[in-house]
Image: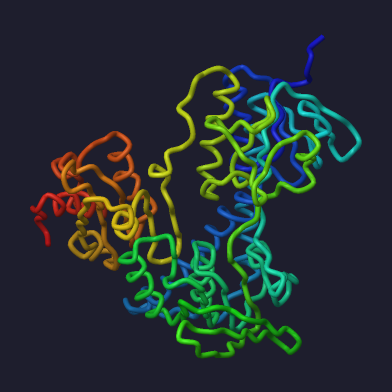
């Protein structure tokens, strides 16, 4: 009789958990996933996938103006946002079922319910049954961070999940927070005719991105009619009237009251580490995040943690890779330890898109690096002009002496796809000249990557 029911128990079937379970199965580990919601986690059901479905519909709405320019009469007055919402839910549902099929295909048991540790190798499901695992992986993800003075009510004060489930558009929307989530919803709501105002406490939109990149995004958002406030602190919220009134204080000390029908609060996320029984088994946490070793092992032997419950970038692709590393370590495969933060791509899907990795110019300067930066504008690539998407650029941040790629930044059409050529070069320890001398198909947006590499070497052809 086996000592444990499974070689691996995974708590959470998000992009970290289900990928880890599949990889474990491939490595010969008998695995099971415990999930209280739908397969795919927040990302697939209430994040990455449905939001990108909305963004696709928003792009179609923006395309209406382009169609009119060639003489076609378009009447967009019949917009039914509930149908847009349905398309996003259909996409999430289809892919959630796909995850369930993948688990079944890989002979992974799917256990519905809420998991909680009763010992290091035992997990109670809804307090009704107990399953055991030689190894247990915590992959319970995160939720929208809630601020007491701006508590979600699902009606006027919205979380990212609330706005994804919204079937009727407001006339006016305030978005608190100009990170990826806030900026993506600003683009979507604006495309569907909502009057949008974005409020950010820090000095720039998309605070983690390169300032030159943000300048392009801010310029395009202004063109779209999206109002933005940076260096502005939200001090209070009044929801007693018909809509909401937000009191803000700007960096110069002046105050203003902003009014709207609803407010989306998108100021970060909180790890789901409560009520898991972590204190029962001695797993250590810091500010809610599980502390981990090089292979995502916790302070308790046999217990691992990945994704949004650990202090790494809260990104689906990060969680997936962490899951792979953790289970390969369990299986004795000796994987590379922890993900190199400089090799993690970031993607923002507003218009224009943003793709980046590694150091910004500001970070390189703060670290005292001997660096230089080179840029090539999208308009220098013929394809961008042909498809009327010439806002943007490709930017390399380089070590001046070694020519090592320290960071890559792309803003513009399909930036989230283009960034990976720069990232592959970084991971493979290639130099800009390797990209500069590689033939790129014409006309393509990827030519801007080639020309950006050439610009870093001082010989860009088309600018």
Q: Nearer the viewer, residue 78 or 411?
A: 411
What is the residue that sits farthest to the front in this orientation? 368
What is the residue that sits farthest to the right in this orientation? 128
Query: Which colour assignment does the render follow?
Result: rainbow
Horizontally, residue 335 falls left or right of residue 462, namely right
Whole-percent x, y for residue 457 in the image: 12, 49
Whole-percent x, y for residue 215 in the image: 33, 71
Residue 141 against residue 362 in the figure, above or below: above
Residue at point 21%, 51% (across, down): 370
Q: Quadrant of the N terminus?
A: top right
Q: Quadrant of the C terminus?
A: bottom left
Whole-percent x, y for residue 351 in the image: 41, 66
Q: Can residue 366 be seen in the rendering of this structure?
A: yes
What is the residue that sits farthest to the top in this orientation? 1
Horizontally, residue 305 falls left or right of residue 384, namely right
Residue at point 53%, 67% (across, down): 182
Residue at point 29%, 68% (across, down): 391
Q: Nearer the viewer, residue 294 or 39?
A: 294
Q: Can residue 93 be seen in the rendering of this structure?
A: no
Residue 10 against residue 240 in the figure, above or below: above
For residue 260, which quarter of the picture? Answer: bottom right
Residue 142 against residue 253 in the figure, above or below: above
Whole-percent x, y for residue 284 in the image: 69, 39
Residue 175 against residue 454 in the figure, above or below: below
Q: Nearer the viewer, residue 202 or 269?
A: 202
Q: How many marks?
A: 0
């Amino acid at each position: 009789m086996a000592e444990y029911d499974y070689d691996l128990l995974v708590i959470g079937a998000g992009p970290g958990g289900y990928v880890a379970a599949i990889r474990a199965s491939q490595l010969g580990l008998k695995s099971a996933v415990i999930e209280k919601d739908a397969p795919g986690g927040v990302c697939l059901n209430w994040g990455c996938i449905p939001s990108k479905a909305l963004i696709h519909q928003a792009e179609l709405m923006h395309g209406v103006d382009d169609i009119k320019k060639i003489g076609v009469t378009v009447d967009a007055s019949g917009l039914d946002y509930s149908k847009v919402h349905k398309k996003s839910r259909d996409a999430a549902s289809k892919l959630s079922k796909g995850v369930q099929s993948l688990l079944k295909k890989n002979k992974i048991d799917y256990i519905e319910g809420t998991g909680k540790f009763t010992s290091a190798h035992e997990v109670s499901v809804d307090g009704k049954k107990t399953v055991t695992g030689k190894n247990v992986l915590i992959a319970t993800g995160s939720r929208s961070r809630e601020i007491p003075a701006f508590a979600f009510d699902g009606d006027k004060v919205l979380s990212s999940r609330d706005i994804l489930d919204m079937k009727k558009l407001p006339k006016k929307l305030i978005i608190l927070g100009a990170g990826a989530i806030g900026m993506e919803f600003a683009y979507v709501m604006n495309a569907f005719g909502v009057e949008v105002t974005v409020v950010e406490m820090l000095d720039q939109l998309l605070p983690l991105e390169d300032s030159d990149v943000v300048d392009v995004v801010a310029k395009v958002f202004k063109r779209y009619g999206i109002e933005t406030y940076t260096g502005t602190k939200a001090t209070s919220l009044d929801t007693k009237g018909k809509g909401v009134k937000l009191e803000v204080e700007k960096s110069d000390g002046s105050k203003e009251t902003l009014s709207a029908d609803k407010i989306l609060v998108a100021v970060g996320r909180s790890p789901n580490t409560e009520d898991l029984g972590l204190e029962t088994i001695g797993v250590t946490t810091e500010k809610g995040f599980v502390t981990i070793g090089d292979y995502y092992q916790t302070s308790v032997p046999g217990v691992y943690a990945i994704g949004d419950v650990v202090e790494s970038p809260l990104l689906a692709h990060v969680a997936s890779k962490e899951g792979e590393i953790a289970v390969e370590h369990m299986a004795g495969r000796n994987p590379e330890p922890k993900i190199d933060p400089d090799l993690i791509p970031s993607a923002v899907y507003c218009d224009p898109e943003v793709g980046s990795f590694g150091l910004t110019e500001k970070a390189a300067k703060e670290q005292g690096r001997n660096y230089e930066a080179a840029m090539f504008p999208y308009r220098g690539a013929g394809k961008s002009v042909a498809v009327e998407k010439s806002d943007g650029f490709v930017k390399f941040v380089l070590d001046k002496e070694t020519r090592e790629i320290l960071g890559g930044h792309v803003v513009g059409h399909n930036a989230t796809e283009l960034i990976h050529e720069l990232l592959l070069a970084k991971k493979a320890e290639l130099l800009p000249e390797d990209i500069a001398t590689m033939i790129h198909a014409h006309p393509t947006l990827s030519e801007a990557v080639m020309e950006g590499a050439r610009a870093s070497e001082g010989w860009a052809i088309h600018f």
